[in-house]
Amino acid sequence: MRPGKRHRVLPGFPLALGYTLFYLALIVLIPLSAVFLKSATLNWEQFWSTVSAPRVVASYRVTFGTALLAAAINGVFGLIFAWVLVRYSFPGKRVVDALVDLPFALPTAVAGIALTAIYAGNGWLGQWLEPLGVKVAFTPLGILIALTFIGLPFVVRTVQPVLEDLDTELEEAAVSLGADRWQTFRHIVLPALLPALLTGFALAFARAVGEYGSVIFIAGNVPMVSEITPLLIISKLEQFDYAGATAIAVVMLVVSFVLLFLINGLQIWTNRSRER
Amino acid sequence: MSGAVVSHWVVHSHRFETNAATREPAWVKRLLIAIALAFFALFLLLPLATVFAEALRRGWVVYFAALTEPDARSAIKLTLLVAAIAVPLNLVFGVAAAWAVAKFNFRGKQLLTTLIDLPFSVSPVVAGLMYVLLFGSQGWFGAWLLQNDFKIIFAMPGLVLATVFVTVPFIARELIPLMEAQGREDEEAAVVLGASGWQIFWHVTLPNIKWGLLYGVILCNARAMGEFGAVSVVSGHIRGRTNTMPLYVEILYNEYNFAAAFAVASLLALLALLTLVVKSVVEWRGQQQLSADQEAT
Amino acid sequence: MSIRVEKIVKRFGQFVAIDNVTLDFPTGQLVGLLGPSGCGKTTLLRIIAGLESADAGRVFLEGEDASDTHVRERQVGFVFQHYALFRHMTVFDNVAFGLRIKPRGQRPAESAIRERVGQLLDLVQLAALAQRYPAQLSGGQRQRIALARALAVEPRVMLLDEPFGALDAKVRKELRRWLRSLHDALHFTSVFVTHDQEEALEVSDQVVLMNHGRVEQVGTPTQVYEHPATPFVYGFLGAVNLFHGWVQGQHLDVAEGRLPLNYGNFPAGTEALGFVRPHELDIATDLADPSGFVAQVERILAFGSTARVELTGAHGEPRRLYEVELSRERADALNLSAGQRVRLKPARIRLFPPEQVAEVSIRILGGLGTQKATH
């Protein structure tokens, strides 16, 4: 065969790949590079003083702290949720299973105002919690609640299929070797679920870090206390401080990329351990 | 983010509950179910119920008045319009990307799939900012756009762009694993029988992926209609002009017009519920197809 | 319609899947491509079909260079290992697919299509299932439909990739016979790939044995079985007892003793490996007999028309294992029992130089399970 004349059997590859790259460049790559190029108009001191201003640093603490905590809560409860959905039958299970995805489907603004209405001082739960000294709405605790809501499906939906695929033979073997139920879970089931659990955790965390809609209503947005980083970007934009907004955005983007990289690695790990 | 058309619809938990090796003591089981249901009620059911309860607190008259108000109607129209443009764009993209990634081998494939996933990990606010930097009055193309009297930021095109960005991965992410799992054999069989590219796509590939495709479209649409952060940055919040439903909810809420805010929100919540119903049906059908396929091999 | 492949080379990265293969497939014959997995047989089949393109070499269909012809125009029928039936189409629509997608000018009328599909379904004896979906069929039925679908477009050649690989043993046997009789009725030129030597020997007119991307031998089933050209072929086509030793005149001197040779084109003193099939070893209960060597009976597997006897050698540690196949009558006459010491007498030894064997010895050892220990 003449070199270079190697036709592919299935058609459409150049068109499909070409269009994919063109579209991604137009929608994703060029706009993203705009952020980095814009931030390059700042010199290092300007950049650093913007991203390390006390109010900005406080917002990192709020954002990453609550996101991490929410992802951890989801790690625990998401695992229980997935376990219950896969291993037990109970009335209404199908409805529960379907509604787990509600945070994916419900617009974040709707979730935001609903959670605020529940936890505000005069709200459904707030009116009982506040006399006990627990203020939820307009505090970091409110942000935590919103981020927990947003992140739940990530953990459930990554752990659930792995748990379903898990060969019962493994547990049967453990039992036949004399392990009790907890030992079996601890040494056999949990290690098998770990890659998926970590992936779910990382996905929930990544989503929570960037979340805006569900948080701003319940957060109260008190500077230094309950102000999240995405909100700071918006307030800088509203003051036409494009460079400042961009500098903070760069910080968030770098964090996102690191997380994406991590999640990719975790997913490869999950798939590998599933294939085994 | 969203799992592929996963197998969680038909859950044969019976086999775990009757197997001595995979069964927990009854009290543990009851405790775990209780925890899960409590969490479910607190975090999922309660917010959903609140939306409808708050929406109807002042009665049906106020509810319908809030929805039929001109600003509300234009927000609904704009939301539908934006989704009607963004979803088909991402549909074509998703199919093209999945065809390239799942049916061919080439260098840089892993990088490309990562790139497709990228918008999921970018904060919506940053997404909006990107387009402001490109097309805003201070942006790269700002002056040129101003000269030619074409508005992107604080106008419909900006809303579409921001929405397209945040929903880019949905359909591709559904299709890629599905089409990879199905392999190339069916398409090869068709090509040996003499089918052309479009014939292969319409008669063989599309029927094989239709449930996954529909699943992706539904999720993409839900996000497109509900997106808040990204569109909030590019919209400019011009009432009756650039307010989508979620943005309109925010405005009403900030004006302490709670009943109206929740009325509009209830429409979005209904859309979410509808999405979940259709999603369940699609999952069920996809599951059926999957088990039929598994039987077939 | 004949097929010729000429100097085909195909690499996947560093791995050479096909290493300069030239082959002729004569018109009207059913040729089996046989070899262990990874030997390149499926890749060669896909290159003939045009589903894969070779790095070098050419494919001729009916003397005409088809190397640059797209699969779509090659007019080959291809049957996939996992059938590749379109699951959303009925059996009827599957078979009709190739006809219905023809360009308007060449497409037969719908009535003609119906008639043709009907004939094909009669041919594969599945007319009653025309309106079923693939998921409702058994594996054997699916493979017959896949064949009917491939035949519908009147291919010039039929290519079958492990057509019975996914079926269970009983259905496999039935389908083999059915394919052979179908071929005898229609006489299309066909090539089929298999890793099952019994299948290849039973069905093919010609067998092509492949290993490591190269052709080891081409011949009729009798030729390749009775006169294996290489140690690989010998080992692949059946169980083997191996003897390592030196040629001395009309004998092979091995650790066990002195074995008679019935041909002698090896110069005296040459190191050689002797291959003996289990049915070429005879057992003598008379220990005083000077020919052959002593071994001890371990197990006797007597069912069906033949009996297999497993023995261990008297020499060396670990003990060598031998396998002998006898007719039932002979086994009954010998009246062997486990633990008995007997003499083994090779009736025929096939010699190969050791270097040639070294290349394939691992396969012989791993693949057969008869010969546990060698030199």
Image (cartoon, coloured by chain):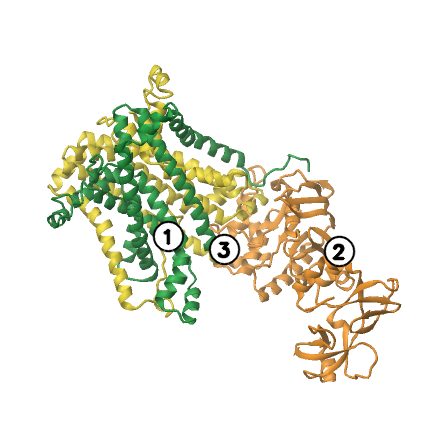
* The colour assigned to chain B within the rendered structure: yellow
Instruction: Indicate the amino acid at tag 1.
Output: Leu
Position of residue C131 measured from the top left corner of the image (x, y, whole percent) = 48, 55
Task: Pick the residue in front: B147 or C74.
Answer: B147
Q: Colour of chain C?
A: orange
Residue C318 percent coordinates (x, y): 69, 72
- Residue at 31% of width from left, 54% of height from top? A76
Figure check: B34 above or below B260: below
User: Which residue type does callout 3 highlight?
Assistant: Pro
Residue C198, how many percent across, how many down?
67, 64
Residues tagged by mark 1 and mark 2 found on one chain of the structure = no
Q: Amino acid at mark 2?
A: Gln
| Rendered-image quadrant of the N terminus of chain A | top right
Q: Mark 2 packing: few (<14 Cα in 10 Å), some, or many (20+)?
A: some
- Secondary-structure class at tag 1: helix
Measure the C-alpha gap from mark 2 to mark 3.
38 Å
Task: Name the residue that disc number 1 marks.
Answer: A197
Which one is nearer the viewer's eye here, B100 or B211? B100
Residue position marked by numbered label 2 in the rendering: C217
Number of residues whose C-alpha sits closer than 10 Å to that of mark 1, classed few (under 14), some (14–19) or many (20 or more) = many
Q: Are marks 3 and 1 in contact (CB under 8 Å)?
A: no
Q: Which residue is mark 3?
A: C134
Do discs 3 and 1 share a chain?
A: no
Q: Could you tell me how far apart the alpha carbons at marks 1 and 2 are, in whole angstroms?
A: 54 Å
Residue B261 sits in which quadrant? Answer: top left
**Do marks 2 and 3 both belong to one polypeptide chain?**
yes
Task: Select label 2 or label 3 by which is in front.
Answer: 2
Q: Establish if A46 lies above or below A173.
A: above
Please name the color used to draw chain A: green
Q: Is residue C188 visible?
A: no
